[in-house]
Amino acid sequence: MQFTTVATLLAGAASFAAAAPTPSTLKSFSVDGLHWSTTPSQTQVSFNLTDPNTGATAECYYSPVLIGGIYTCNNNDNFKYGFNDDLSEISVAVTFPKGTLDDSDAYYIANGTASTGKECHGTTAGEDCTGAAHIEVPIETIQGVA
């Protein structure tokens, strides 16, 4: 799953003073502590997300996670995420609209997708699943003005 619409990416923005990243300094997004809890009726997900390009972080948890859903991290509206059909890939989008970075004309929209390293253990009543302890999500597309 890829984030492809600017409208989706621009939905919601929190104020944040950060330096605008440039193409020569871009680093992958970091996903840490990825965990799912699945029952026959719903899937819950939680993890921490970091954008080392801006220094911004977010705690992300949601229930129920639906196939094809795009979710906003709980404490930072600039971070969005989603999963493919079997939760084996995570897609991340980070958006800082004009006026939210240190330079009022700067903006930043970047996204990428990576394997989750999903492993599950459980019974027919439910599963506990984890992703890799640390996932690097490479930036695949970026728009912006530094």
Image (cartoon, grey):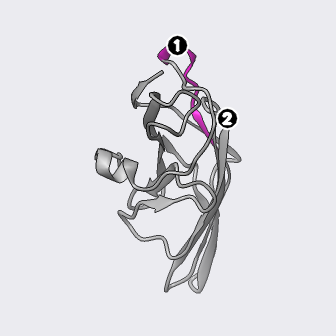
Q: Position of residue 94 (x, y in %)?
A: 49, 42
Label 1 – label 2 distance at C-alpha: 16 Å
In the image, 116 versus 74, the foreground residue is 74
Q: Is residue 43 above or below residue 117?
A: below
Q: Is residue 13 above or below residue 45?
A: above
74 lies left or right of 91: right
Query: Does the magenta run of residues contain 28?
Result: yes
Residue 36 placement: quadrant: bottom right
Query: Does the magenta run of residues contain 110?
Result: no
Residue at 64% x, 32% y: name it. Answer: 52
Residue tagged 1 = 24
Residue at 53% x, 40% y: name it. Answer: 100
Q: Please, what secondary structure does the residue beneath circle 2 have?
A: loop
138 lies left or right of 33: left
Pair 1/2: label in front: 2
Task: Answer few, some or many: residues within 10 Å of disc 2's Cα (few below 14, many 20 plus, some between 14 and 19).
Answer: few
Q: Is residue 19 above or below residue 83?
A: above
Label tally:
2
The residue at the far top in this view is 24
Q: Position of residue 67 (x, y in %)?
A: 38, 67
Residue at 58% x, 49% y: name it. Answer: 117
Q: Please, what secondary structure does the residue beneath circle 1 have?
A: helix
Name the kind of residue labelled 1 in the image.
Answer: Ser
Name the kind of residue labelled 2 in the image.
Answer: Gly
Give the extent of the magenta segment: 23-31
Q: What's the mark number on residue 100?
A: none
Residue at 38% x, 61% y: name it. Answer: 85
Q: Position of residue 24 (x, y in %)?
A: 52, 13
Residue tagged 2 = 55
Badge 1 or badge 2: first in the primary sequence: 1
In the image, 70 versus 68, the foreground residue is 70
